[in-house]
Amino acid sequence: MSWFKRNKAGIHTATEHKKEAPDGMWNKCPNCKKPLLNVEQVENKYVCHYCDYHIRIGSTAYFSILFDNNEYTELFSNLKAGDPLNFEDSKPYKDRLVESQAKTGLKDALRAAVGKINGQEIVIDCMDFSFIGGSMGSVVGEKIARSIDYCLANKLPFMLISKSGGARMMEAAFSLMQMAKTSAKLALLSQAKLPYICLLTDPTTGGVTASYAMLGDINIAEPGALIGFAGPRVIKETIKKDLPKGFQTSEFLLEHGFLDFIVDRRQLKDKVSTFLKLVK
């Protein structure tokens, strides 16, 4: 069977001479499944350069994309969730919080920061889906409320990047109250004539969509993002009808007037900067 062997130098390599690629160097596009070099992902703003799929990212990546030279000051970083209901499902809520904090390095599902976009100072709040599905709990609502107060005190525009599965069930009514709380605070921002920019990313669902995520002076979304209140399965079972193709995608919402425009992540910083200049 010598004809079956690869003996040419450079093709046949003994196992002991093979080199392993370092962990974290490569990733795979969830859409087209092609391999992506991590360095190239960062340079391309975490957008697949083969199919333009927008890979899910967290607050650290968004801040690096938006803030000039990745320079910003984090606000209210000491806030942590309590457990007023002593909630327990498959595990106690307290244990789930500790586990999520250790796994993600985050205190909760939202980070707030102040910095500059093309020289214009702005407060940006960004949700992290990796922390209990980006769920909206009391800390998320409180950070948004305090961020708005900071904007009012310093006459700054406000931007909120939503990425969430909805309200945090482990906090029950305490979570749902954040919908009214944040909406009331945004009304004060509107009265002060300070701009509020909403960016909806994949996914933005539940009580987040029903409150602050859709109340912007300008509502924008990333391509292909899942945006809605209830899930497609629940809606279909409720209305007993098949849903339109592409239902609850950002493209569908744009077509039906729920969004102002869809923006490619690679142009996001310039688009936001242009809007801020227009509303000065």
Image: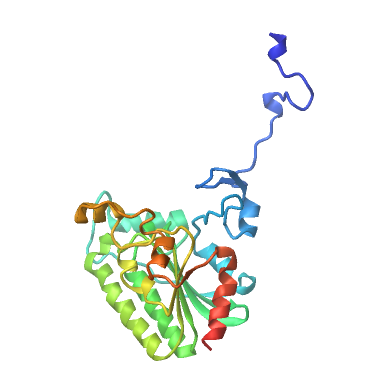
- Residue 51: where, in percent of width, then height? 56, 51
Residue displayed at 28% across by 59% down: 230
Of all residues, the one furthest to the top in this rendering is: 1
Percent across and percent down for residue 22 are 63, 43
Above or below: residue 56 compared with residue 32: below
| Residue 187 visible (yes or no) | yes
Q: Whole-percent x and y of residue 278? A: 54, 85
Q: Nearer the viewer, residue 45 or 237?
A: 237
Picture quarter with the N terminus: top right
At x 54%, y 43%, the residue is 33
Residue 97 drawn above or below residue 151: above
How far from the left and from the top, in percent, is residue 151?
Answer: 46, 85
Q: Quadrant of residue 253?
A: bottom left
Q: Is 96 located above or below residue 118 in the figure? A: above
Look at 27% across and 54% down and name the residue there: 92
Query: On the image, which quarter does residue 97 sit in?
Result: bottom left
Q: Nearer the viewer, residue 224 or 215?
A: 224
Residue 2 left/right relative to 149: right
